[in-house]
Image (cartoon, rainbow, N blue to C red):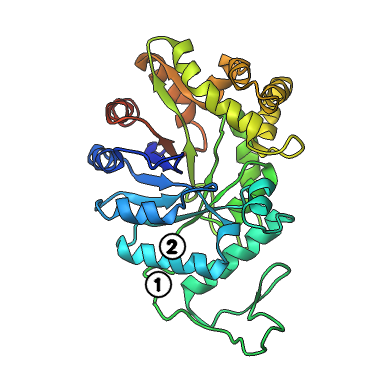
Amino acid sequence: MSALKLGYMIGYWGAQPPTGVPAALAEVERLGYDSCWTAEAYGSDALTPLAWWGAETSRIKLGTSICQLSARTPTAMAMAALTLDHLSGGRFILGLGASGPQVAEGWYGDDYRKPLARTREYVEIVRQVLARETPVEFHGDRYQLPLPGGSGLGKPLKSITHPLRADLPIYLAAEGPKNVALAAEVADGWLPMFYAPRHDGFYRDALAEGFARPGARRDAESFEVACLVPILVNDDVEAAADAYRPVLALYIGGMGAREVNFHNDVFGRMGYEAEAKLIQDLYLDGKKAEAAAAVPTELVQDVALVGPKEKIRDDLEMWRESAVTTMVVSGAPDQLRTIAEVVLG
């Protein structure tokens, strides 16, 4: 069993940029964290902060969790990836995700339908750019390079810049079993957002399906699973859980439409279908505090580590036995030091 690694989640910005990131990054690099991660929703982008703050680091890996497919064409994404990989000396990890229909269609004006087929094409084009073996040419259902029609003057092109690594790692965000299997088939890693170790067999089965497909890039031993795992150290378990309940209520209840909310579906598969529906109903009715209060402590403890250090050490054993290879955490510098002490020893 490999030792668990730690990642630091910078995330996406709220109404204003977060404060203290350079100091926190310096601290996690000193503490031996393996990676740090930015994200994007419909405000700040994932790449600019990673480049800006990452420039002050020397060892830690720099990842996006996630870059949204709708935000950039595959070739534009490949350009950004190879650029950041050069600037960081080969420390970049490209995390990609389809997001959801509300953001893809509402924010980007992009057709969300067939996200799995679109993801497969997207990754294939990015890999073509990074391989730089021939001019990029692709004829898929979603993407066509060169574009047919138009001026008629488009032609296949090869990146002017030679990528530092043709095998730059690509991780996929995925929640449903089909998407998890796709990640195992075409990517180097998986970015789950809500993972319950007690359902580890479910995830491993989905991953195994992908690993077994012809042409799969990885196997279970060489595949990375970098999972967001809130770790809230507090002598009072309920107080620690209270700190995370509003976040869970937001994602279960408000991050998606009533008809399509992939986060809500995740907790339904865990056995919380009735609770997830109640949380969503309350949240969408504007009763956010009540929605947070409706999040069961058991549900919190399924996807997060909460409570005194000794309890967290005990609960960690289930995570060490799971498919997760990196626990991605957040917090103030003192919290990040405590987490390193507990997880890394």
Residue 251 visible within the image: yes
| Quarter-of-image position of residue 151 | bottom right
| Image: 148 above or below 205 | below
Residue 167 visible within the image: no
Determine crowd level at label 2: few under 14, some 14-19, many 20+ residues with C-alpha closer than 10 A: many
> Which sits earlier in the primary sequence, circle 2 or circle 1?
1
**Label ID, residue 168:** 2
| Residue 120 in picture, x, y percent from top left | 64, 61
| Image: 129 above or below 101 | below
Mark 1, residue position = 163
The residue drawn where x is 73% and y is 56% is 114
| Quarter-of-image position of residue 121 | bottom right
| Quarter-of-image position of residue 7 | top left
Which quadrant holds the N terminus? top left
Answer whether labels 2 and 1 touch (C-beta < 8 Å): yes
Q: Nearer the viewer, residue 221 or 227?
A: 227
| Image: 268 above or below 180 | above
Q: Nearer the viewer, residue 189 or 2?
A: 189
